[in-house]
Amino acid sequence: MTHARTSDPDTSHAAAESAVQFATTHKGRILAELKRRPSGASWIADALGMERGQVNKRLADLRNDELASTSGTIESRSGRRERVWIAE
């Protein structure tokens, strides 16, 4: 499913398809990292060379897909507390 309206130009449809493929790839990489070890979003982002916002979006998707959940907190790379994510 893409996120473009039928009235959108072809470029919007191409971008929507690309975003879906990109998200799927990110989810797989993040899930693989979580299977290696539970971690926080900032640490996952650092390990995978991604932005923290990208990781947070995909972690929410993984949670909704019941592939990941949270368990406690950990110190983030910036020194603040963040949730620890684990693979289901």
Image (spheres, rainbow, N blue to C red):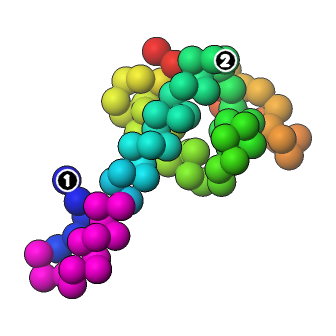
Residue 23 is marked as: none
Q: Where is residue 65 in the image (x, y as percent from the top left)?
A: 34, 30
Task: Indicate the quadrant where residue 53 lies.
Answer: bottom right
Choose between 35 and 83: the one closer to the eye. 35
Q: Mark 1 points at which residue?
A: 1
Task: Look at the picture and state if 57 lies above or below 41.
Answer: below
Q: Where is residue 44 in the image (x, y as percent from the top left)?
A: 68, 36
Which amino acid type is marked by label 1? Met
Q: Mark 2 points at which residue?
A: 37
Q: Element type at marker 1?
A: loop
Residue drawn 28% across and 80% down? 11
- The question of residue 15 being in magenta is answered with yes
Residue drawn 36% across and 51% down? 21
Which amino acid type is marked by label 2? Arg
State which region is magenta.
6-18
- The question of residue 29 being in magenta is answered with no
Residue drawn 59% across and 23% down? 34
Q: Element type at marker 2?
A: loop
How far apart are the two marked residues, 2 and 1, measured between alpha carbons?
Answer: 31 Å
Main SS, magenta residues? helix
